Amino acid sequence: MIQNLVSLDLIKIDMNTTRPHLIAPSMLAADFAHIQHDVELVNASQADWFHIDIMDGLFVPNISFGFPVMKAIHQYANKPLDVHLMIENPDRYLAEFKAAGASVITVHYEACTHLHRTIAAIKELGCLAGVALNPHTPVHLLKDIIADLDMVLIMSVNPGFGGQTFIENTYTKIRDLRMLSKGVNDDLLLEIDGGVSLSNAAGLLEAGADVLVAGSFVFNSANPTETIQALKAVDINVHTL
Ligand code: DX5
Ligand code: ZN
């Protein structure tokens, strides 16, 4: 186990200087028959986080994987696990996801009746706390919780499947979120998930994104290591609001 290498120090970035963006390959698109190989590929790459998609067949019309697979990834991973819970009533499982290796836990706005309580519970576990928004959910609904969040994940596809087409309205949502968080939570990380590729990465970063999730674009490419490198090298130094 090399989990001791993984700490929240690896996650917090200094938002007062430049805003280097993070790359989080989605392991949903990895080869589950050779998961150790793909974890070690990400370890050796310029990726920052492992994005872990958990689907329950209720909140989304698909089932991905659960704790045994996540623990197997964690066993070999030397970078933080960024866990995206596409599940109903996530409060039931937060402690178990922490125990399985989560450093960041993101729940869906649409799946939480008592979101403030859920966010507090994630933070009490020592994880960074994120909220994900489906494509139809307006950013302004986060107004009264945004000061308490470490991250907002904007879904740029409908959650449930990898390999879908990017939704263009995402750019507007990123800018809206940056306006909403300005002066209230300037450290807020903004993650974009779904259909991310080299064709939209620069635009997303320019609009104000900090973390780019990429699944099929990375793992279906001829050379995933070079693809991660290319996403990391997309050149944008400052966010213009
Ligand atoms: C979709 C997941 C995404 C997905 C991204 O519900 O949340 O993380 O794995 O896959 P791509 O990058 O292929 O759209
Ligand atoms: Zn995801």
Image: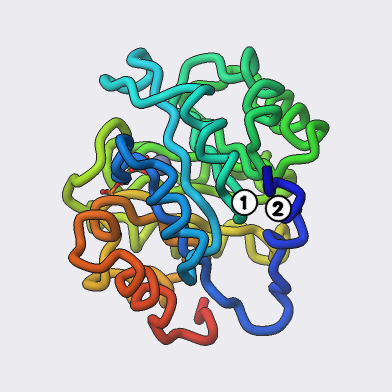
Say which label, 2 or 1, has the lower sequence index: 2
Asked where in the image residue 27 lies, by quadrant, the reply is top left
Q: Is residue 67 left or right of residue 223?
A: right
Between residue 183 and residue 2, name the one nearer to us. Answer: 2
Above or below, 105 relative to 215: above
Q: Quadrant of ligand 1?
A: top left
Above or below, 144 relative to 203: above
Q: Which residue sits at x=26%, y=72%?
A: 198
Between residue 9 and residue 3, name the one nearer to us. Answer: 3
Between residue 40 and residue 53, name the one nearer to us. Answer: 40
Residue highlighted by disc 2:
6
Per the image, label 2 sits on a secondary structure element best described as loop
The residue under label 2 is which amino acid type?
Answer: Val
Residue highlighted by disc 1:
80
Q: Is residue 234 left or right of residue 106?
A: left
Above or below, 78 relative to 14: above
Where is residue 97 drawn, in percent x and y? 63, 27
Q: Is residue 89 left or right of residue 102?
A: left
Between residue 222 and residue 93, name the one nearer to us. Answer: 222
The label shown at residue 234 is none
Label 2–label 1 contact, CB within 8 A: yes
